[in-house]
Amino acid sequence: MKALIYQNANTLDDFAIKLAEVTDPTMNDNDLLIRVKSFSVNPGDTKIRRAVSAPEDGHIILGWEFSGIVIKTGKKTKGFTVGDEVYGVGDVSRDGNYAELVSVDYRVVAHKPASLQFYEAAAVPLTSLTALGAILDENFQPYPNVSSILIIGGSGGTGSIAIQYLKAQTNLKIIATAYGKESEEWVKSMGADFVVDHFGDVKQQLQDIGFHQVDQIFSTSHTAEHMHWILKVLSPYGHLSLIESPEALSQITPNTFAFSIHWQMIFTRILKEYHPELQSKFLNQLSSLIDSGKIKTTAKTRLIGLSEETIKHAHTLIESGKSIGKIVIDDIE
Amino acid sequence: MKALIYQNANTLDDFAIKLAEVTDPTMNDNDLLIRVKSFSVNPGDTKIRRAVSAPEDGHIILGWEFSGIVIKTGKKTKGFTVGDEVYGVGDVSRDGNYAELVSVDYRVVAHKPASLQFYEAAAVPLTSLTALGAILDENFQPYPNVSSILIIGGSGGTGSIAIQYLKAQTNLKIIATAYGKESEEWVKSMGADFVVDHFGDVKQQLQDIGFHQVDQIFSTSHTAEHMHWILKVLSPYGHLSLIESPEALSQITPNTFAFSIHWQMIFTRILKEYHPELQSKFLNQLSSLIDSGKIKTTAKTRLIGLSEETIKHAHTLIESGKSIGKIVIDDIE
């Protein structure tokens, strides 16, 4: 098959991902062999490219968020047949999906929303599983005793899905942070009940809209910069959900009141064999929510074809830090 | 009343706590006025003494863990009458109980275990509420899906109470860390099912006793030193409970798998008016467990009388870092 590969960690200036002919993926009994139709390019991909090299004579195939068509089912797979249109997040310990074919454990694969094109579907699973893994409990249920949630960075991909899901599925009061008019309007269109400026006096802004404190906070980015007010507005025994910035946690002082921190990492279920089937089940629920119009894709930039040009463009956009929404490579063949 | 007071933050070498005659405590409608019979001296007391000075012309009275007798009830108190023998943890934002009298909100006071002497009871509430606030949820219930717990520093005051409570009230497999024969025997006598050496290869020791990983970890001290193995033995979606060492949290890396951190601070309920009545309710349950022989006090060192000598001795013992069990000042009058 054709795949985008590299051998040694490389920078944008010395970008080294090349299109090459490689052997088809090996399949385990639990695997589906999937013909990739579209895939998302994520910040995690660029971080691995900059930091990780392949063993001698080996290569690395990045990319772990895809949509495609099942072309072969492993002996122990259930619920899928050849021809099924699917989407999902793969396994970071195996070859990724910057390729024509990818092997993925069926327990983390789901049926693609019928109402979405492949490129629109490819943008959904990773941010959704990150967002909802962070704000829901290990069984994908909201925490008890929570009636309000503040989402820091509500206009980003993860924040946007979080707001849409909470609006569709819960009665929580949703407050999103945003900066600037465009971002503010975006989070409102996603379903936020209230918007605050995360560079302003957040405590005061919350009081102005009637919140003495909030029961849960989901920080999607720049947690270290916001930590100084996070612990002032979080309720006692409140929940702080994090997906990055561990250095922020060192700012917690011993006289900070009791609270919980939830640390989310997207590949936990498959890497640790921790109920991976819940990941598939949850993505199937998400497909229903999408098909009923309650959640929209966040695909924004669509680049055509498996090529060195498209992948370099995608990595450049991500490393600029200025791209909005998800970047998807479409029409793999 | 007589009280032990100081004005300026002071070191052991320049120890400045003096016995003095001061005005009796003021009472709010929610307060009980309590004649102090015994009180514990805790590490938190020594930290405040070293760091915090009183306003000009003012003084500081330390100590927030006591046993005593109710001598007056505020207008809005319920469930207590004059003469009741009580114990509890006070409110760090008010004068403490290094004194003959203390005023405490009735919602955090409980009836003293009848089977204990005052000095034995005074050793119980703070470590218990710290330990159980850390390992149980906000309603004092065990976390769901947890079948094993590892307690780091099992032979300390907080660890000892945690082991005893879990043994008496749950079916969890309890693994305690200890160092040396005496400490190992102590945690077994508290009820630990297994003991491991926290300076050894903890992952290997756990495997040797049949645990691939544990669902919950309660780190009672030196978390930063142990963080390197904590995240290797904690189950995915596991719970880490902490009462100190925020700097350890900065060692969490973005590719650490999903888990939760529970941060416990003893005074949260009363300072934040967050269901303080649950604290009283829980201490009353603890009294029943003590009176039925399921939990023992950890009082070890009993010093007699409210005097400069006893309090200096107590602070010296604590700052040596070598005292075992709790230090109680008894026979206040």
Image (spheres, coloured by chain):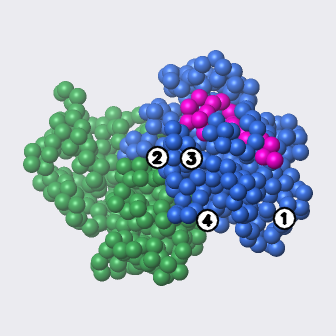
Chain colours: A green, B blue
Q: Secondary structure at mark 2?
A: helix
Q: Magenta stretch?
A: B315-333
Amino acid type indicated by mark 3 = Ala
Q: Secondary structure at mark 4?
A: loop
Query: In the image, A246: left or right of B113?
Result: left
On the same chain, marks 3 and 2? The answer is: yes
Name the residue tied to disc 2: B246
* Residue at image location 63% in from the left, 43% down from the top: B42
Question: Could you tell me if the residues under marks 4 and 3 are in contact, i.e. CB atoms within 8 Å?
Answer: no
Name the residue tied to disc 1: B72
Q: Which mark is first along the chain, 3 or 1?
A: 3
Q: Is residue B183 visible?
A: yes
Name the residue tied to disc 4: B272
Residue B198 placement (x, y as % from top left): 54, 26
Amino acid type indicated by mark 4 = Lys
* Residue at image location 48% in from the left, 65% down from the top: A232
Question: Could you tell me if the residues under marks 2 and 1 are in contact, i.e. CB atoms within 8 Å?
Answer: no
Name the residue tied to disc 3: B16
Task: Determine crowd level at label 4: few under 14, some 14-19, many 20+ residues with C-alpha closer than 10 A.
Answer: few
Callout 1: residue from which chain? B
